[in-house]
């Protein structure tokens, strides 16, 4: 069969989600954010919850998430997304409230807000992009930067004496009584993307059913910050990031304690 | 009841949707009273003790963005921490009510009363060009009434409002008349009255976005010009003040909050001895009653500002009075509250008044 | 056994030439334009070997810019 015989509306098996606005994202080529945005848009559509979804955008590369997915959004101050989500969710219990945060936002400047929202068991989903670096500000050290990893503020590599250790904050969150689902995923292969989609779907479902706080960490690449090509970045992530941040469920219970 | 308790009762009766706070002396009774009254079982109001002042004000930001009537309360060091969220509220044009029951600073300072946050409250406080509508209560009744007034003004102009109380009026006990219970607004009313609110898209064609970010300089300047336009409108329409014995006054005291009550005692004593002193009590510290100060400056021989600080409101009084009358300051700091005798002494010293 | 025919379209204006679809494709269908660039200067992806496509959507799944659509026919 020739492509023109196959390319017909009735044969379409994969298309751009309707909720993604018709704009080009500001993300660098190959950035993991794009894949995760797409999954969020697909799920909100498929679950039929776009009309009651409230997204909380972070400060960091995903600051403009509200330009890309056509739902209601609030843009938070740096690190404060879980505090906003707490109020938005408690005051609008019928809504699906989720935050979308990077590692600096969630695990450095917003550590307190993250831990306490999860510890209260707020019925929200936290989507956590961990690429081990500050992308937006030009590649500085993040709390999750690996030991030895070179960044703009650790030009000789992260040194534990000087900079402390990489923070696996999701491990901490899994130990809190308020969380019901804590998982660590990635989007480097088609299979990984599908697993991440299933994880976010589970998290959204938990939030809608008021089971407690769900956290989906997505170990991601920042090829600009890492100074590699997108494909090399995926390789580097598999070889280096997964050792400190192994994929899989860290907690999966019916309901918060 | 105490001023702080009155705030809690008034918030529930206003039909407020949420309170988010963190304990700090001398205002912890606001959160404690709300916790005791359990409004979540009656009106459905959410009451939450946050993990920090920063989280509390950002909860207010998140709640306000959904069109709800939300508030927080704190005292000076806590309000410093809240400045981030207050700037975001102003920049995102969101209504909210913030209560500051001031204590002495700087730093951790003292838990005793103060008015040293006048600059912070009236000049913006956080980063960027913005103002809050600042209400100054002098009585427990005003603590009660200004909750509704603050919320109403805040929703009318889509800008945060602050009740700037001192520790005296927060802790003082007086009789109050509480307003009748109002119902909380329904979801439909919020969608209709606040079309900008983030409520979930519902039947709207596109999502609403509440943000303070705008990287296009021309658009950001436009935003700022719009904020300034709102502030000019507020200055035109919302100046509030109270005057005592100003008709025939030869000298004027300008004081706000509970200090105005001390000054009134001093004025009564002076008048008993035939010295004609008047009192101007600004109720809105921003917008400041500039025109009234100017009018009175033309009439009197001298103006004394009395404040629980090193001289903050005096700058606004001097700007308004211009060359029309000399302006002096008398203040106590560190949590010390002056008595009427000290106020008269200050008048004597500054203006050679024979009292 | 049913034979599966696939086809992909790439929105060349939106594509940033990140190459992830090329790596993900199990059938070596896609390639980046060696010389041509789109109006933002990217060497966009295109189906160089369209007949090999099985419509598995691996390329579209990993595409960060949602610029690939996939079609599939079983015979």
Image (cartoon, coloured by chain):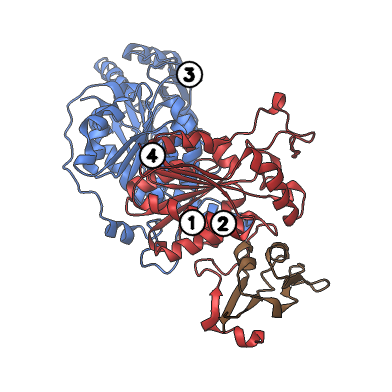
Chain colours: A red, B blue, C brown
Q: Residue at x 72, y 74 (%)?
A: C46
Name the mark nearer the viewer: 4 or 1: 1
In the picture provided, is A131 more to the left or to the right than B86? right
Q: Residues within 10 Å of mark 4 (few under 14, many from 20)?
A: many
Q: Give the percent coordinates (x, y) of residue A72.
A: 44, 58
Chain ID at mark 4: A
Q: Cβ–Cβ below 8 Å for labels 2 and 1?
A: no
SS of the residue at dot 4? loop
Q: CA distance from mark 4 to mark 1?
A: 21 Å
Q: Residues within 10 Å of mark 1 (few under 14, many from 20)?
A: some
Establish if B274 lies above or below A98: above
Residue labelled with disc 1: A198
Task: Return the disc, 2 or 1, that comes first in the chain's sequence.
Answer: 2
Residue labelled with disc 3: B108
User: Which quarter of the figure is the N terminus of chain C placed in?
Assistant: bottom right
Residue labelled with disc 2: A36
Chain ID at mark 2: A
Residue labelled with disc 4: A121
Q: CA distance from mark 4 to mark 3?
A: 32 Å
User: Which quarter of the figure is the C terminus of chain C placed in?
Assistant: bottom right
């Amino acid at each position: 069969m020739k492509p023109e015989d196959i390319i017909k509306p009735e044969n379409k098996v994969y298309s751009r989600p309707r909720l993604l606005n018709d704009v080009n994202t500001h993300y660098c080529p190959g950035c993991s954010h794009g894949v995760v945005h797409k999954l969020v848009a697909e799920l909100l559509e498929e679950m039929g919850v776009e009309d009651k979804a409230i997204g909380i955008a972070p400060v960091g590369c995903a600051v403009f998430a509200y330009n890309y997915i056509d739902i209601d959004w609030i843009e938070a101050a740096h690190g404060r997304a879980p505090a906003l989500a707490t109020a938005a969710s408690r005051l609008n219990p019928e809504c699906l409230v989720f935050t979308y945060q990077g590692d600096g936002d969630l695990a450095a400047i917003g550590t307190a807000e993250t831990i306490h929202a999860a510890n209260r068991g707020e019925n929200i989903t936290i989507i956590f992009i961990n690429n081990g670096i500050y992308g937006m500000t030009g590649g500085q050290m993040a709390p999750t930067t690996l030991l030895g990893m070179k960044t703009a503020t650790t030009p000789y590599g992260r040194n534990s004496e000087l900079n402390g250790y990489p923070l696996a904050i999701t491990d901490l969150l899994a130990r809190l009584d308020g969380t019901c689902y804590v998982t660590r995923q990635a989007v480097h292969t088609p299979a990984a993307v599908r697993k991440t989609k299933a994880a976010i779907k589970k998290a959204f479902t938990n939030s809608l059913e008021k089971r407690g706080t769900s956290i989906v960490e997505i170990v991601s690449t920042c090829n600009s910050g890492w100074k590699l090509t997108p494909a090399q970045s995926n390789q580097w992530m598999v070889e280096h990031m997964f050792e400190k941040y192994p994929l899989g469920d860290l907690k999966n219970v019916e309901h918060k304690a | 009841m105490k001023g702080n308790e009155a705030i809690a009762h008034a918030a529930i009766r206003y039909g407020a949707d949420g309170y988010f706070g963190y304990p700090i002396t001398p205002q912890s009774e606001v959160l404690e009273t709300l916790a005791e009254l359990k409004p979540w079982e009656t009106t459905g109001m959410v009451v939450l003790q946050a993990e920090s002042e920063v989280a509390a004000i950002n909860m207010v930001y998140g709640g306000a963005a959904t069109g709800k009537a939300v508030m927080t309360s704190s005292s000076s060091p806590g309000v410093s921490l809240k400045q981030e969220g207050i700037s975001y509220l102003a920049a995102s044009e969101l209504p909210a009510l913030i209560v500051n029951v001031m204590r002495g600073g700087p730093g951790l300072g003292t838990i005793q009363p103060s008015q040293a946050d006048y600059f912070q409250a009236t000049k913006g406080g956080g980063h960027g060009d913005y103002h809050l509508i600042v209400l100054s209560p002098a009585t427990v009744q005003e603590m009660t009434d200004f909750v509704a007034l603050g919320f109403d003004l805040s929703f009318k102009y889509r800008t945060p409002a602050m009740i700037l109380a001192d520790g005296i009026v927060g802790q003082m006990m007086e009789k109050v008349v509480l307003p009748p219970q109002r119902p909380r607004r329904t979801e439909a009313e919020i969608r209709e009255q606040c079309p900008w609110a983030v409520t979930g898209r519902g039947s709207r064609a596109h999502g609403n976005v509440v943000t303070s970010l705008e990287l296009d300089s021309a658009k950001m300047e436009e935003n700022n010009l719009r904020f300034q336009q709102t502030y000019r409108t507020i200055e035109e329409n919302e100046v509030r003040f109270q005057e005592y014995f100003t008709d025939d006054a030869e000298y004027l005291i300008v004081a706000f909050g509970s200090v105005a009550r001390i000054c009134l005692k001093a004025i009564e004593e002076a008048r008993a001895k035939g010295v004609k002193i008047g009192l101007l009590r600004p109720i809105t510290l921003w917008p400041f009653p500039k025109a009234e100060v100017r009018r009175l400056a033309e009439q009197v021989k001298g103006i004394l500002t009395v404040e629980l600080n090193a001289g903050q409101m005096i700058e606004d009084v001097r700007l308004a009075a211009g060359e029309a009358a000399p302006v002096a300051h008398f203040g106590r700091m560190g949590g010390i509250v002056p008595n009427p005798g000290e106020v008269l002494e200050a008048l004597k010293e500054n203006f050679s008044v024979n009292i | 056994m049913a034979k599966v025919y696939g086809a992909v379209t790439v929105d060349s204006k939106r594509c940033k030439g990140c190459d992830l679809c090329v790596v993900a494709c199990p059938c070596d269908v896609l390639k980046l334009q060696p010389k041509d660039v789109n109006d933002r200067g990217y060497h966009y992806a295109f189906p160089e070997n369209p007949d090999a496509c099985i419509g598995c959507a691996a390329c579209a799944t990993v595409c960060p810019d949602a610029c690939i659509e996939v079609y599939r026919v079983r015979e």
